[in-house]
Image (cartoon, grey):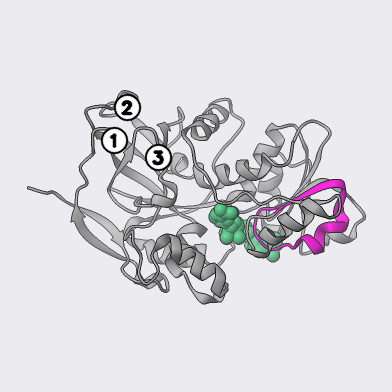
Amino acid sequence: MTLGVRAVVYDRYGPPDVLRLEEIDRPVPKDDEVLVRIYATTVTRSDCATRAANASSGLVVSFLSRLYSGLLRPKRRILGSELAGEVEAVGAAVREFAVGDRVSGTSAGRFGAYAEFICMRESAALAHMPASMTFEEAAAVCDGAILALMCLRYADLRKGRRILIYGASGSIGTAGVQLARYFEADVTAVCGAKNVEIVRSLGADRVIDYTREDFTKNGETYDVVFDAVGKLTFRRCSASLRQGGVFLPTDGIENLFLVLLTSRIGDKKVAFAIPPRFTKKDVLFLKGLIEAGKYRAVIDRSYPLEDVIAATRYVETERKTGNVVLTVN
Ligand SMILES: NC(=O)c1ccc[n+]([C@@H]2O[C@H](COP(=O)([O-])OP(=O)(O)OC[C@H]3O[C@@H](n4cnc5c(N)ncnc54)[C@H](OP(=O)(O)O)[C@@H]3O)[C@@H](O)[C@H]2O)c1
């Protein structure tokens, strides 16, 4: 007999209201898998882009997105990648986790976290939850932080290196500020007025309010410009890069071409960390930072799972501060 559990599913690409609650069979873990009872997940920009898969982001982007997620309709019916919860059952070969363990991580491109239960491989990007974090906080750690980490690995950050983080108030941005600070770089963060204080509290050495000052016109230069929100172009910020500097985008298909071009011409480079890779090693690295008091998840709003459409609409405003959580169970 199969047990029915709740999940948010979608069967066609489209606006947020293609999402709906449905009862599905409770998944059963294979030998190398754990079954996690999810208490919190998040709505990310990746969830939204995958669900929309629309031509407004450009035909090439839409095609590439569908190549991965299903050309005509979604191959995976359940979105959501970040999660925190409790191990409900383990497969016969699982050694790292036991029933009752509190865990958090990300299923990344496999999705499946907008649900009461998920099966994940023991070797996936999953670890014991950081001590003293709530499920909501733990769920909001991995996506933005691992994406930021992947980008910053191209930046050779260390004491004395100057980085400017544009869009420092988003999920990737709030993570980027804290990680750059951890790597002892000199951090200038750019965000809107309402987020200046929170971004400063994350460790930025200075914060520029983009509604009052254009960082490309103030004469300052940086070793690294990290566009954590996908709103800058290499062309626009090139004069703000020092000789040998690097531009790190998070969006924009044209940046793939610029990676190739700048590897051959000029001494300012573009480095684009795609496709993203989410590993257990990185989840454990972040757990270490959190437990050492050097990283925290920034949460803007929480919604119950059944309000996923409202949560998604909010994320699609592109104005959230940090992360948006869905509470489950
Ligand atoms: N490379 C990958 O694999 C990958 C994966 C996932 C997402 N992404 C991309 O990464 C980017 C960031 O995702 P995210 O989830 O971190 O973003 P997000 O949380 O949705 O970013 C929202 C924040 O960006 C700020 N913002 C909006 N417009 C801005 C502008 N013109 N200038 C400066 N700040 C602005 C908003 O602050 P204000 O309200 O104050 O403007 C808000 O706090 C997106 O472009 C997304 O598509 C890439």
292 w.r.t. 21: above or below: above
Viewer-proximal residue among 220 and 253 = 253
Magenta stretch encompasses residue 214 = no
Residue designated by label 3: 135
Q: Which residues are magenta?
A: 227-248
Nearer the observer, disc 3 or disc 1?
Answer: 1
Q: Amino acid at mark 3?
A: Phe
Viewer-proximal residue among 137 and 1 = 1
Viewer-proximal residue among 272 and 149 = 272
Nearer the observer, disc 2 or disc 3?
Answer: 2
Give left or right: position of 172 versus 62.
right
Magenta stretch encompasses residue 229 = yes
Q: Amino acid at mark 1?
A: Val
Precedes in sequence: disc 3 or disc 1: 1
Precedes in sequence: disc 2 or disc 1: 1
Residue at x 48% of width, y 64% of height? 65
Q: Distance between the Cα atoms at labels 3 and 1?
A: 18 Å
Quadrant where ligand 1 appears: bottom right
**Answer yes or no: do the residues labelled 2 and 1 have beta carbons within 8 Å?**
yes
Residue designated by label 2: 97
91 w.r.t. 216: above or below: above
Within 10 Å of the Cα at label 1, are there few (<14), some (14-19), or many (20+) other Cα atoms?
A: many
Within 10 Å of the Cα at label 3, are there few (<14), some (14-19), or many (20+) other Cα atoms?
A: many
Residue designated by label 1: 34
Image coords of residue 259 (percent x, y): 72, 55
Q: Amino acid at mark 2?
A: Phe
Give left or right: position of 20 versus 82.
left
